[in-house]
Image (cartoon, grey):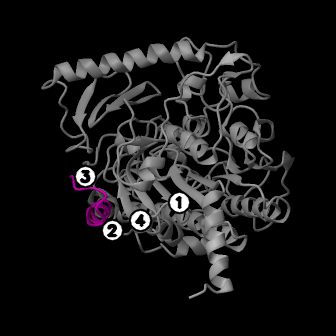
Amino acid sequence: MKPTIAGLAVLVLGAALHAAPPNFLVILADDLGFSDLGCYGGEIATPHLDALAQGGLRFTSAYNTARCWPSRAAITTGYYAQQVRRDVVTGVASGGGNRGVRPAWAPLVTEFLRAAGYRNYLAGKWHIDGRPLGNAFDHSFEIGTGQNNFFKAPGNTDDERQLTQTPDYYVTVSTADHAIKYLREHAEKYSSRPFYQYLCFTAPHFPLHAPAADIAKYQDTYARGWDVMAAERHARLKKLGLTHQPAAAFERDVGAPYAFPADIAKLGPDEVNLPVPWSTLTPSQQKFQAAKMAIHAAMVDRMDQEIGRVIAQLKAMGAYENTLILFASDNGASAEMMVRGDGHDPAAPMGSAKTYLCLGPGWSSASNTPFRRHKTWVHEGGIATPLIAHWPAGIKARGELRRTPTHLIDVVPTLLELAGAKVPATIKGHAVPPAPGRSLVPAFAKDVTVPHDYLWWAHDGHRALRAGDWKLVALKDGPWELYDLATDRAEAKNLAAARPEKARELAALWERHLEQTKVLALTDPAAAAPEGAEKKAKKKQP
């Protein structure tokens, strides 16, 4: 039986998809909790991300760096942020926000992809030193560092030109609009070349801002409180197979990581700065707190809707089948509480442009279910991220889980392998040191272990190391704690006293990596600080 013309076309297209290097869509959320997505046990409507998970893979032990700017360094360079001067290391001129300048040997992945024939596009939060167009991006919609109002455009730029404020402006929608614009141009002018679209939403980072219609969808969802929500999420996580362990208990005496008592006072008597039992709140406090979580949910919901529009564009341009889509969060949900920007008007509708609300430790604890702590800490709640991988032409598995520990440093080597891109031995006269990231490509085929000797964290004085199932972790100025994550990802049973030899072994490994990091970070002279860095350094970065 001879194949039909249509059948031959399908065969030819399939061969072309497999022969051509894939496109890349790397999506990063901001302050998303581990269990906020529906496909990770959440009650928030995220049908587009759920569909990607059902048609691809979910990783159960993926990690970020606990904070926005070091995560962005890791996901775009393949190195730990401290190695490339993008987070604090004692004795090294580095820091958060735009204060640290990467070594000459640490360009972004876009440089290597461009050399391999890719076009590169940014839409969203930058938070890396330099500017996108000077780092091998062909187009960039850049959300300014101080995104303190989701309804305001000033500070945000398209190819370094200031955006004009429009009456219906909402930054999550604008982020998707620009990604779609760049992809449409790509389809029209550069269809023979692959692309890398880096899509970085600020949602659901504070302030809690969302369109009123999106908030209304969740107005009655959270009246039962954070304790009930956490329990229900944990039950769904177990049903989905994402965990079989007990959930971390609420740490009732742990509030925001930084104290802003004057700011909290501005929010009024219904604000709560500890994750106390829901039943102890007054009816007025419960109503206020439930409304805050409804806004957070609306922000996540809207982000998913906008991801759906970007996916529709991929399908319209015939790129969906051969696009690797990766989705993650830059850190866990945030317990931070503050007032910035234009301040907070308690008389304005919650979630509107004149308000400035933060999620706070009660809902953050629930959003990070089943893990302990929040953004900025390097206990599991601060560093665990959902990670979805979807690529119809390259990943045969549908709806499967991958349990290997992995980290944002693994994204760059994954992209480089699939693109056939090469890293030169030297860059600008400096030898390129081996990167700690490992390709995820073997895990796309089956549930194998990505071979890290260990994963390492240091942020805000907190520190951690994971080697196999052992995790060593410490609070700032605190003693080392030791946990067996095979049975205790809730980090409830500290084994440091029972297994002192293991704690010492891992502590020595952490210290050795720190010393190697200092040497690595100083292997070339510091470049000139980026424009505006000194001014920004005086402000605490989000």
Residue at the extreme left of the image, as rendered = 498
**Disc 3 residue type?**
Ala
Q: Quadrant of residue 100?
A: top right
What is the number of the mark on residue 39? 4
Lower sequence index among marks 2 and 4: 4
The secondary structure type at the circle numbered 2 is loop
Chain part drawn in magenta? 230-247
Pick the residue in front: 451 or 528: 451
**Would you place residue 77 above or below residue 363 in this image?**
above
Residue 455 image offset from top left, x and y in percent: 40, 32
**Disc 4 residue type?**
Cys
What is the number of the mark on residue 247? 3
Whether residue 232 appears in magenta in the rendering, the answer is yes
Residue 212 image offset from top left, x and y in percent: 61, 71
Camera-side mark, 2 or 3: 3
Q: Which residue is mark 2?
A: 224
Residue in the picture at 42% in, 42% down = 406
Residue at the extreme front of the image, as rendered = 1
Q: Quadrant of residue 355?
A: bottom right
Lower sequence index among marks 1 and 4: 4
Q: Which residue is mark 1?
A: 394
Q: CA distance from mark 2 to mark 3?
A: 19 Å
Camera-side mark, 3 or 1: 1
Residue in the picture at 21% in, 52% down = 245
Camera-side mark, 1 or 4: 1
Camera-side mark, 2 or 4: 4
The quadrant of the image that shows the N terminus is bottom right
Whether residue 416 appears in magenta in the rendering, the answer is no
Lower sequence index among marks 1 and 2: 2
